Image (cartoon, helix red, strand yellow):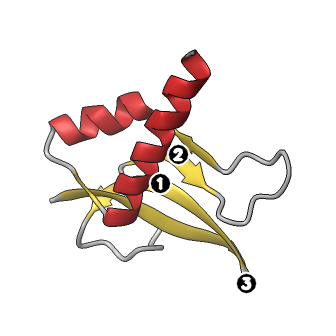
């Protein structure tokens, strides 16, 4: 089964996550993934970008049966709110 989840990168005590589409049997940080569709920076400060997701690709993979992790699902909701607020 294909899953959309976070893969941790970055230095110790400074996490940075890539949002990736991967087979659920792969290890979280294995580096083998189908597609990278965004990133999440939980320690962003000032004008640094905290979240970027390609919502079209998220929808594409969900149509094909990909499941999202709980955290990625909440990030998708946040990203959709940001997109609608920016459009207004």
Question: From the viewer's perspective, is residue 76 above or below residue 86?
Answer: below
Q: Secondary structure under badge 2? A: strand
Q: Picture coordinates of residue 56 (x, y %)?
A: 38, 28
Q: Residue at (67%, 51%) from the top-left corner?
A: 50
Regarding residue 40, the answer to whether it shows in the image is: yes
> Is residue 46 shown left or right of residue 7?
right
Location of mark 1 (residue)? 19
Label 1: few (<14), some (14–19) or many (≥20) C-alpha neighbours in 10 Å? many
Residue situated in front as seen by the camera: 13 or 32: 13
Local crowd size for mark 3, using a 10 Å CA cut-off: few (<14), some (14–19), many (≥20): few
Residue 8's x, y, as percent?
Answer: 55, 71
Name above or below for residue 70 compared with residue 11: above
80 is higher (above) or lower (below) than 74? above
Question: Going 60% across and 23% down the picture, which residue do you hit?
Answer: 86
Q: Could you give the CA–CA distance between mark 3 and mark 2, rounded to whole angstroms? A: 21 Å
Instruction: Give the residue number, with chain letter if any, for mark 2.
Output: 38
**Image quadrant where one finds the N terminus:** bottom left
The picture quadrant where one finds residue 6 is bottom left
**Labels 3 & 1 near each other (Cβ < 8 A):** no
Q: Position of residue 5 (x, y in %)?
A: 38, 61
Q: Residue placed at 40% from the left, 63% from the top?
A: 71
In terms of depth relative to the viewer, which is nearer, 60 or 34? Answer: 60
Q: Give coordinates of residue 87: x percent, y percent.
A: 56, 16
Q: Dot 2: within a 10 Å radius of its alpha carbon, few (fewer than 14), some, or many (20 or more) residues?
A: some
Q: Are marks 2 and 1 in contact (CB under 8 Å)?
A: yes
Label at residue 12: 3
Label 1 secondary element: strand
* 53 relative position to 41: left or right: left
């Amino acid at each position: 089964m294909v899953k959309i989840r976070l893969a941790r990168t970055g230095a110790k005590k400074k996490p940075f996550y890539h949002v990736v589409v991967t087979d659920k049997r792969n290890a979280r940080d294995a580096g083998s993934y189908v597609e990278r569709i965004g990133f999440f920076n939980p320690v962003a400060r000032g004008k640094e970008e905290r979240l970027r997701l390609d919502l079209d690709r998220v929808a594409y993979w969900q149509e094909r049966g990909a499941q999202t992790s709980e955290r990625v699902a909440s990030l998708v909701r946040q990203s959709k709110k940001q997109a609608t607020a920016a459009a207004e």
